[in-house]
Amino acid sequence: MNLREYLKNFRRNISTKGIINSIKYKAKISSLKKVDVLFSCHDNSRPVFHEGTFFSPLIDSINFNLQGLSSYTIALPFSIKSGVLAYGNTVNLNSYIIIGFIKRFIKSRSLTLKNIENDPIIDVYFRIFKKTSPKIIIGILPSVEMCIAAHKLNIVVFDLQHGIIDTSRKESFYSDSKRKINKKECWPDHILVRNEFSFEKVKSELKFSTPILIGNLNRYFYQNIYKEGKENQAVFEDNKKPVVVFTLQPIYPIDFEKENSLEGIIFPKVLFELMKFDKFNFLIKLHPSQIQHPILYKKHISAFKKLFFNLRNVDYEICNKYPLDHSFAYSNLHITYNSASIFDAMDYGIVSIVLDDDLEKLRRYLGKLVDTKFVITDPTLKTDLFEHFSKNNNLENNFYNFYNFINEFKTK
């Protein structure tokens, strides 16, 4: 893989400012102290600005409940936010990762991992973990290099599910081909999953990682930590109409992109036509990566202004200032291509109309959830939407397993 291809694959995680901040706000490994827990996540998983700080609803739900234990959060390459801007004692060590990539390229003429025994980036994480000596590491998609370094020091690694557990696509974090050196030490020991469907998928398809069910931490964060925005609902011309939330994705199949290009962005034409009938109110919810990236955000908002300039039943501004759960809390239906937000919708008792009709692929993504009442595949949106509206957005969400997980580490 050449440099251009590699950077293209990681375009959502790379920015000029992120690289500059790696140097500007560099933390030194030698200055780190021993901690009980190491967390890790990227800015893409830290979309919520709350009380002057950016939060990751997933990571920081755990971090918040482990108060009393010492910890750092590693800002993954190449995050912009660290220090006081990010919750959880977040440190930026990415200058070491930059040097590691340079050494790797000089040594092997490749930016990808070739040799787990003598790799510069594995060495960086090894030094970090040895200096901090954590009991556990909890991260969102902890890299192969992180897993290998942690296992050399007998540190247990937890991956925290943030999307769909997909083992079929070669570029997926959970595919064997993602790890050209497919050994146990390349994988997290456990995956903290959000529902029983993901639990069964991990259990049946991943041989090196075991699942632990802890529930939907996005919802936990919104209900127990994040208190703002609950009264800041979108104001439509007619607030009595049912509310439909549409969640965008950063990536679609090429054919879908070609057929659904509107004003320079990808937006389903069939949905756009439905919105014109003015039977429903719509919340157009961007993906976190589209909100966090200033250029992508401006591009989408500019396109929305052109597309919806004469529609009074659409909000794309207020809803994108708050977490996805803010939208689901007062919506009646969810439409998406095949986003992992289907799981979030289910947690609120909301049915998802899925525009992707590839059932084989959907079963790989969603498992048995595809065959439940919460998923309707309809790429033409000819379904009578009224039949699937949810009237109960406050289903009981049992976090019993989550509290057990927290208490286990508090008592160690």
Image: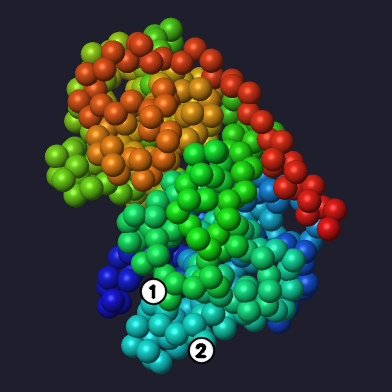
Above or below, comparing residue 295 to residue 33 in the picture: above
Question: How many numbered dots are placed on residues in this image?
Answer: 2
Quadrant for the N terminus in the image? bottom left
Residue lying at 28% horizontally and 37% vertically, measured from the top left: 359
Residue lying at 27% horizontally and 73% vertically, measured from the top left: 4
Q: Position of residue 382 (x, y in %)?
A: 22, 18
Q: Crowdedness of circle 1 by 10 Å Cα count: few (<14), some, many (20+)?
A: few
**Residue 276, picture quadrant:** top left
Q: Position of residue 160 (x, y in %)?
A: 57, 52
Residue lying at 27% horizontally and 78% vertically, measured from the top left: 2
* Sequence-wise first label, 1 or 2: 2
- Give the labeled residue for mark 2: 118
Q: Is residue 395 left or right of residue 12?
A: right
Quadrant for the C terminus in the image? bottom right
Residue 180 tag number: 1
Res. 329 visible in picture? yes
Q: Residue furthest bottom?
A: 107
Which amino acid does the dot numbered 2 rest on? Answer: Asn
User: Which is closer to the viewer, label 1 or label 2?
Assistant: 1
Which amino acid does the dot numbered 1 rest on? Answer: Lys
Which element type, helix, strand or loop, lies under badge 1? loop
Q: Is residue 304 left or right of residue 283?
A: left
Above or below, comparing residue 118 to residue 190 in the picture: below
Q: Nearer the viewer, residue 283 or 391?
A: 391
Q: Crowdedness of circle 2 by 10 Å Cα count: few (<14), some, many (20+)?
A: few
Q: CA distance from mark 1 to mark 2?
A: 16 Å
Above or below, comparing residue 278 to residue 398 in the picture: above
Tell me, what colour scheme is on the image? rainbow
Res. 41 visible in picture? no
Residue 232 tag number: none
Q: Position of residue 283 (x, y in %)?
A: 39, 26
